[in-house]
Amino acid sequence: MKVKAFEMIKGDDMHCHLRTGVVLKSVVDFTSKYWGRAIIMPNTTPKAVLTADIASAYRNAIKIACHDNFEPLMTIQINDKTTPAMIAEAKKAGVVAGKVYPKGVTTNSENGVIDLKSLYPVFEAMQEQDILLLLHGEMPGENVFCLDREEIFLKELIDLNKRLCNLKIVLEHITTSAAVECIRRLGSNVAATITVHHLILTLNDVSDGKLHPHNFCMPIAKRPTDRAALIEAATSGHFRFFYGGDSAPHLEENKECSEGCAGVFNAPIALQLLAQIFEEAGKLDRLENFTSKFGAEFYGLSQNSGIINLVKKDWTVPNSYPCGESKIIPFMAGQTLHWQVEE
Ligand code: DOR
Ligand code: ZN
């Protein structure tokens, strides 16, 4: 019998960009009403979240803007200015993870890292303080072909895990079958997040005869075989693959231009679309593990206490959401989805 409605434990979005200012106010509720907690990315502008103090102030700004029962889980960005003392301060301030952006591979990563190995002393401090390391897993450098950046980066991950085997590492927003296989092979301290858009898109959806800027993100969507491997991993019930949406809002004018920004704004539709994908895979019963159990477990958190009700009812994704004087175009704008969250 086909499921028409179900309830599940409220989930965690283990990778989310909420930005600041007017964008924060416009987007935060899409995350805070559907998820109990979210890991908040530190690549804000004009000031990135590099210290415990900035993380605390950012947390307060999010709390003021969001639903009462939502908990932002804060991160700091780790770069060549980060010291072990800063890690200890971050821990005291309740920061749960440090994020590494390789230099220049994505939005606001100009202050990122070229040589991961130069950060090993900081990673050691993270291991001691029990702070997770979140990796944007793409090899930087002009000479690396863009579709190969993730696969080449896997060697860095393997080396790091060998050297610091008690450090908990999350390889973020994986996009290749090579990354799926690598995570399966590595031990219990290494996990991966998977976004909802990488379960839908291939490179054809970014650029076929025309350019589709709202499907453009980093790491860029890859081959159909990669997408199939990601769907298999997400729906497999393997506890080291869990949801991290990488919802990344940009104003319309910053997407629809030359040098458009990377990022897919999926927060308004992520959970509904996940239900659809898991249903199509015949694995709806495994959605709760992926969204609400495995991530919390890996982060050492208890499960959320709230409940979410999903019902099978078609709806059309809005063409845009207002944001100050401008707007933000969501993922799947104008398309019909089959599941809704009962509010
Ligand atoms: O597409 C992306 N957008 N990938 C990232 O890693 C960053 C994000 C953003 O901040 O817009
Ligand atoms: Zn991200």
Image (cartoon, helix red, strand yellow):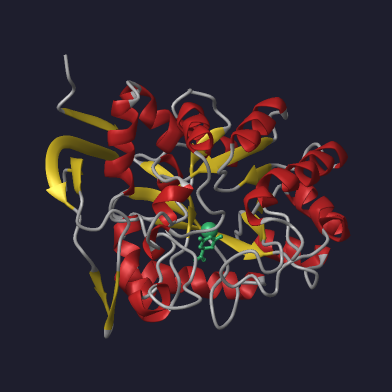
Q: Position of residue 338 (x, y in %)?
A: 18, 39
Kindly indicate the quadrant of the structure image that contains residue 98: bottom right
Residue located at (55% from left, 83% from top): 46
Q: Position of residue 47 (x, y in %)?
A: 59, 81
Apparent side of residue 134 relative to residue 144 in the rendered image (left or right): left
Would you say residue 244 is visible in this rendering? yes
Q: Is 249 drawn above or below residue 332 in the view shown? A: below
Question: Nearest the camera: 189 or 233?
Answer: 233
Kindly indicate the quadrant of the structure image that contains residue 29: bottom left
Q: Is 257 drawn above or below residue 181 in the view shown? A: below
Q: Residue furthest top?
A: 1
Q: Residue furthest front?
A: 209
Q: Is 261 drawn above or below residue 299 in the view shown? A: below
Apparent side of residue 274 relative to residue 236 in the rendered image (left or right): left
Question: Nearest the camera: 183 or 105?
Answer: 105
Apparent side of residue 268 relative to residue 338 in the rendered image (left or right): right
Residue located at (46% from left, 63% from top): 263
Q: Position of residue 188 (x, y in %)?
A: 68, 29
Q: Position of residue 185 (x, y in %)?
A: 71, 26
Question: Nearest the camera: 243 or 97?
Answer: 243
Residue located at (67% from left, 62% from top): 101
Apparent side of residue 269 relative to residue 100 in the rendered image (left or right): left
Would you say residue 306 is visible in this rendering? no
Residue located at (64% from left, 45% from top): 171
Q: How many marks?
A: 0
Rendered-image quadrant of the N terminus: top left
